[in-house]
Image: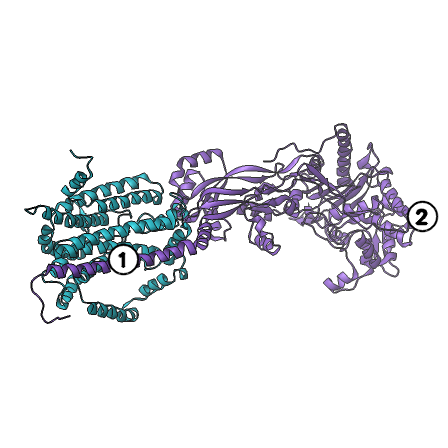
Chain colours: A purple, B cyan
Amino acid sequence: MKPKRRPTIHDHTIEANLFARRAIACMVVAAAVFLVLLTNLYHLQVTGFQEFQTRSNSNRITVLPVAPNRGLIYDRNGEILAENVPVYSIEIVPEEVDDLDDTLHRLATLLELDETAVESFRSQLRRARRFPQIPFADNISEQQVARFSLHQHHFPGVSVEARLQRHYPFGELFTHVVGYVGRINRQDIERLRANDEYGRYAATRTIGKLGVERYYESILHGRPGYQTVEVNSRGRVVRTLDFTPPVPGQDIYLEVDIEVQKIAMQQLQGRRGAIVVMDSDTGGLLAMYSNPSYDANLFVHGISVQDYQALLQDPNNPLINRASQGRYPPASTIKPHMSLLGLESGLIDINTRVWDPGYYQLPGVERRFRNWRSWGHGWVDMKKAIQVSNNTYFYKLAHELGIDRIHDFMAELGFGQSTGIDIHEENAALLPSRGWKRATLNEPWYTGETLSVGIGQSFWTVTPLQLATSTNTIVTKGRRLQPRFLRAVRHGEEIEYQEPFELPPLQLRSNDYFTAVMDGMERVISRVDGTAHAAFLNAPYRAAGKTGTAQVISRAEAERTPEYEIVDGQQVPIEVDERLRDNATYIGYAPADDPQITVAIAIENVGGGGRNAAPIARRIFDFYFDYQREVELVTLPLERDHARD
Amino acid sequence: MHETNPRSLSAIFQRFHIDLPLLLALIALCCISLAVIYSAGGQNIDLVERQVARIGLSFVVLLVFAQISPDTFKRLTIPVFIVGLALLVAVLLVGVVGKGAQRWLDLGVVRVQPSELMKLAAPMMLAWFCARQPLPVRWTTVFIGLFLVLVPTLLIARQPDLGTALLVFSSGIFVLFLAGMSWRLIIMGLLALGAFLPVAWFFLLHGYQRQRVLTFINPESDPLGAGYHIIQSKIAIGSGGLEGKGWLQGTQSQLEFLPERHTDFIFSVFSEEFGLIGVIALLFIYGFIIYRGLLIAIRAQHVFSKLLAGSITMTVFIYALVNIGMVSGLLPVVGVPLPLISYGGTSMVTIMAGFGILMAIGTHRRLTLRDEPGR
């Protein structure tokens, strides 16, 4: 180049050539750059195609779980005890709502709900969530649905959802048996995770919390289905690509008979107590009712704080299942069991007689252990002792047996331990022993306590369910059947009946011992001076049983309590606290020669068992045998009357 | 009169100063634009109708500009540039804020965006300046030219509108390059730029700006934040594959995973639905437009016309490069639309005005040849 001399006038040829060269350079650069762009695009669209296609699909395709329908629960005749009913609820996805306060306020006004709905929603909002949407109002009426639908466009992020919800058509009748489902909470999630079952609950909102609903959760729940859906960038479902239907939970049939259960409920009206009615041959529970009860439906969509407080603070403790969790001194109902042990031990035979002067005295001890009839029963043998509920006989027997033998035998009959019933709400109650007393009270065992245990008092407590189960072992001559609710499981069209659950039988030296004890129990009713004779007058069947009257306070204490006090110079009777009155207990079975049903009854603070519990057993037996006849006439097929959903 | 005769048909186009190949390429782009906008906008016909209106307006502007003689543009250069600068200063002083930047000037009746005017005024000014002396340009001219283009560039960058600033600056640089700026200066300039980058990195950039560059280098480091757009865009392009998912079938765009679907990221929608084959076709059309524009520049009679035509053409190239490079992850995200495809009015009118000038340069030259006596 010669930069020194430059022409000052334009040379068109030089300029045109220079420009053309530069323009061609531009073209080359542009072509090169486009080639680079294309190389990169080739890299993305051809080399990286698989990877980006996968990422694009994972962007848009989501798998949503679909909740299975819960299996239904029927009684033994196909009466529905737990069903699924469609309900509507208003649900909110908080992230899609612009002004939550305003939305909640307007919603509450529109649906005519009070502030508690808003507060409940806020408390749910603070908790960990399993689903993007949070229910604002459950169980709303069709009118409310209609009203909301009309104004839906004013409420972005709010929607009406229809779902199946558990419903218990008989309210409080079966609460302690069937139980209920409730919202899955954090503990439930932790437990499910620990059992590696959480995946099955991906779309489920409720889980069995109590009773059969809880115990048979794995049968009732079913398996979730899956819906492969396309979603947009905000997670809204655009369309369904694939659908794997859920497998619904299996329907189950319970041993309970709604008619028997209703009678049990009716008999306990106004009382605190429990009734257990067992099929003698299978251990199936025909009825199990604990009063007071409560409506299971309260818990299904979250019980309100007020309702729950009311249940918790009710002095009658409706939340306690008295049949399997109530601990009662067995009192004289234990005398047949003691007699069985006496025979097995060889310390007595059926002819062994004891002279009852109205009390029993330990050798060299001043204290008298009293019979309930202060003048005594005279000479009593074992059957008579059961028949008239003589205490002296059993004081002596217990004294001779000693606590260790009593404890070991009664443990074999199932006392002091779980019966194996198929609900989790069970209490083992307490079968005392030397070891137990040392461990808990750090005291030695006293012989006097053995005597009290001999008549079912002292530390010994049982549940009505244990009473029924142990009595059934006597009446089945040693079969140790576990109490059961589950009768059958439906697999599609097939109904699979459950075998009875049975522990190895109780082997005695002779089966006659059972017969002898059962004889004594029949005399309780058949003999004029039997303690339940009055209750079963003119019964059209042969029944057997044993009454019990458990002192809530000891007799000594009762004697120390004055019956009057002086107020303003006048004698005023002291009202004995209702809760200090005796508990009535009863065990029984019928027919005496071929036992079909076994019952156990415990009623709190009503007085003697002969007068208060035995008549209830009578009514249950009467009803049952009457009804059995009807049932036999019209054999009820075990079929579903109610279609699913 | 002579409708059936192709020669007389081309004469009609000549009469109206229309470059037919360029026009056909532009129409092809506009058709693609409408199809992709319909898909990207969620099949919203309103959006398409508005874009049709803009395209119509743009073609009117193109036709009007094509009728103006290049000499007239040359005469108007200095007033237009001064007015442009004045408006840019006015924007910074009394401009209207929109979308986080101060770009608009409210004139009561209409809002104008002076930076768009500068996209044409700056190359005109530099072309005028370089054409005053014989080519190649001397280094003094280069430095004065650089100063002339840096003033509007910095004013626009202050708004801030980095995309437009970049386009205005590059239009000036292309004028200088085409005017024969010496290779030694070019190499020195590139070296200076290379040396300046680390200095800028350590001393001039704020932390968040450095973060933005880092995100560009590795978008996966912030997949839900700044990297989200570019990741989703790459997924869209890549999942299109060779043949594409088909028109209206692009899941990334239809399901709204892509940001700015019908504006800055419209190329991703196009790539997802039409695949690499579609992309090659689109780049071919752009390549043809660039070729045609540079051909017009080479054939132009006067230096001013040559430089202006070349610069306008290369600006369109820069538009396409920056946009495609941005959405495919080669360049940092700068708000530059894909020319004539992206939805949006202002830049489309400016680009079409530029093509109008290009056609004026291409056709008026021949007209003067034909009008020569003795033909």
Image location of residue A137, percent across then percent down: 48, 42
Q: At x 39% / y 51%, what residue is drawn? A: B236
Q: Nearer the viewer, mark 2 or mark 1?
A: 1
Give the letter of the chain under mark 2: A
Crowding near pointer 2: few (<14 within 10 Å), some, many (20+)? few
Please say whether residue A9 is visible from this viewpoint. Answer: yes
Residue A53 lies, with reference to residue A68, above or below; the image says below
Q: Left or right: B169 with respect to A265?
A: left
Label 1 secondary element: helix
Image location of residue A35, percent across then percent down: 32, 57
Image location of residue B194, percent across then percent down: 27, 69
Amino acid type, residue under disc 1 in the picture = Ala
Q: Left or right: A444 with respect to B188?
A: right
Please say whether residue A316 is visible from this viewpoint. Answer: no
**Which of the numbered marks, if any, corresponds to residue B64?**
none
Crowding near pointer 1: few (<14 within 10 Å), some, many (20+)? some
Q: At x 77% / y 62%, what residue is drawn? A: A435
Q: Which residue was labeled with disc 1?
A: A30
Q: At x 80% / y 40%, what residue is drawn? A: A589
Q: Are discs 2 and 1 located on one and the same chain?
A: yes
Q: Going by the picture, which residue comes out furthest to the top?
A: A633
Label 2 secondary element: loop
Amino acid type, residue under disc 2 in the picture = Asn
Q: Which residue was labeled with disc 2?
A: A351
Q: Quadrant of residue A499?
A: top right
Q: Quadrant of residue A173?
A: top right
Give the letter of the chain under mark 1: A
Q: Going by the picture, which residue comes out furthest to the left?
A: B373
